[in-house]
Amino acid sequence: MDIIEALKTRRSIRGFKQDPVSRETIHKILEAAIRTPSGMNTQPWEFVVAGGKVLDRIREECGKLFNQGVIPTNDMLRKPFEGVYRQRQVDLAMQIFSLMGIAREDREARKQWMLRGFRFFDAPCQIVICAEKEMQYHLDMLALGAICQSICLAALGYGLGTCIADQGIMYDHVWRQYAAIPESKRLVAGIAVGYPDNSFPANRLVTGREPVGNITTWLGFD
């Protein structure tokens, strides 16, 4: 796939077929993604890849904690968005709920939708991006974000869909238990990976983008 086409057509997939994704395929994706640039070549990323019955157990535990109202433990949790960023978040939710037929006043349906996030959208594979907690320099964070994009674009080459989300790593102690991740490392992002279910309504969503002209200052161009 042409790289420009990939950038323009890639979207978040929230409904997956249950066909397994092979270890070999994920290895090839990560092998390509690790060519991502990082400040001073620090390569701050590490990966935990889960699938099969182990992932099923992790998702069940995370879903159970969510249903019990347990407060998430991941120290990467962000503050609430404000201003235009909050509005974009709200617009996204409204678009998804419309596609899924979830009414604004239907709290139970909205809760079940949130639960899907804590269950990694029932994807057959979940990649967790980890980094040492000391890696907090802005270029480290830039590199970690960049490798998420690289993974998502590489996955397209294998017919796979992805969704970058933090819900699946909010209960980081569950992942630490299964993968023996030490407290010195932070769970930065989760990426659900699988073959897209094209019949799933939310997968039709193509989110809008602010026009380049509204967010770019040009200097020295006639």
Image: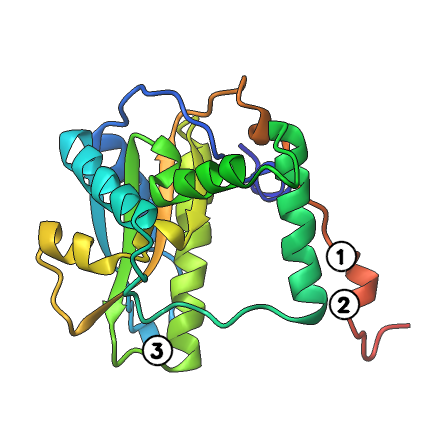
Q: Are marks 2 and 1 in contact (CB under 8 Å)?
A: yes
Which secondary structure lies at badge 1?
loop
Looking at the image, which is closer to me, 67 or 212?
67
Q: Residues within 10 Å of mark 3 (few under 14, many from 20)?
A: few
Looking at the image, which is closer to me, 187 or 144?
187
Left or right: where does residue 156 sit relative to residue 48?
A: right
Residue highlighted by disc 3: 40
User: Which quadrant holds the C terminus?
Assistant: bottom right
Left or right: where does residue 130 sit relative to residue 79?
A: left
Looking at the image, which is closer to me, 74 or 12?
74
Where residue 68 appears, x then y in whole percent? 29, 49
Which badge, 2 or 1, comes first in the chain's sequence?
Answer: 1
Say which amino acid is labelled 1: Glu
Residue drawn at (63%, 55%) of the image: 89
Which secondary structure lies at badge 2?
helix
Residue 215: numbered disc: 2
Q: Are marks 3 and 1 in contact (CB under 8 Å)?
A: no
Say which amino acid is labelled 2: Ile
Q: Residues within 10 Å of mark 2 (few under 14, many from 20)?
A: few
Q: Residues within 10 Å of mark 1 (few under 14, many from 20)?
A: few
Where residue 140 appears, x then y in whole percent? 37, 74
Where residue 221 appears, x then y in whole percent? 85, 73
Residue 210: numbered disc: 1
Q: How many marks?
A: 3
Which badge, 3 or 1, comes first in the chain's sequence?
Answer: 3
Say which amino acid is labelled 3: Met
Left or right: where does residue 80 sit relative to residue 91?
A: left
Residue drawn at (50%, 72%) of the image: 79
Indicate whether 63 appears above or below 86. Answer: above
